[in-house]
Image (tube, rainbow, N blue to C red):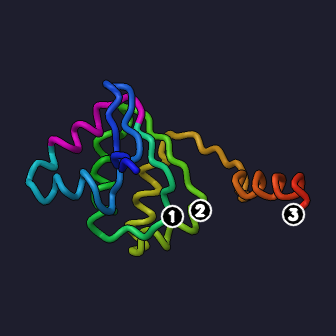
Amino acid sequence: MKRQPAWRVHGRRSITRPRFGDGPLVEAADEKVLGKTIARYGRVDLLCIDELGYMELDRKGADLLFQVSTEREEKNSVAIASNESFGGWTKTFTAPQLCATIVDRLTFGGNIIETGTDSYRLAQTRARAQSNGTD
């Protein structure tokens, strides 16, 4: 199976799936080209971050997310998908002050759309199982 890249740049339109715990940002920090990489994340029209809150971020990953959000602040859009409420993000960002700062930065001037806590994937699986008579 071909491994999909952690992120893709689609012209200036969007970057999808940036990874803050590992991947391009951490590699850029290690290679001393972090400023250029963060600037690239700052220039795109839409930054999509999927499954934020799914895994714990170490301090370095959380700092990278903060730097990217600072670079984008009031310039370009960010779309974040998370199965966790903001209260649950304390498991992702283990330092409470850092968690509060990141939530504040990401939500300032934004629109929050809550779709509920039920997983649509789980609902589809259950519906499929019922239609097949295997429930």
Instruction: Return the residue at label 1.
Output: 54
Q: Residue furthest left?
A: 32
Disc 1 and disc 2 in contact, CB within 8 angstroms: yes
Q: Which residue range is magenta in the image?
A: 36-46
Q: Main secondary structure of the magenta part?
A: helix
Answer with the quarter of the image where residue 130 lies. Answer: bottom right
- Residue 38, position as x, y percentages in the image: 23, 44
Nearest to N terminus: mark 1 or mark 2: 1
Camera-nearest residue between 78 and 13: 13
Depth check: 80 or 86 in front? Answer: 80
Residues at badges 3 and 2 in contact (C-beta under 8 Å)? no
Pointer 1 local density, CA inside 10 Å: few below 14, some 14–19, many at least 20: some
| Residue closest to the eye, 73 or 47 | 47
Residue 118 magenta-highlighted: no
Please, what secondary structure does the residue beneath circle 2 have? loop
Q: Position of residue 118 (x, y in %)?
A: 74, 58
Q: Image quarter for residue 87? A: bottom right
Q: Residues within 10 Å of mark 3 (few under 14, many from 20)?
A: few
Residue designated by label 3: 134
Is residue 95 left or right of 71 when viewed as pictured?
A: right
Q: What residue is at 43 percent from the left and 70 percent from the top?
A: 56
Q: Secondary structure at mark 1?
A: loop
- Tell me the kind of residue under disc 1: Tyr
Where disc 3 sits, the SS reads loop
Q: Does the stretch in magenta take in 41?
A: yes
User: Which residue corresponds to mark 2?
Assistant: 84
In the displayed structure, 88 sits above or below 20; it is below
3 or 2: mark nearer the eye: 3
Q: Residue at x 54, y 49 (%)?
A: 81
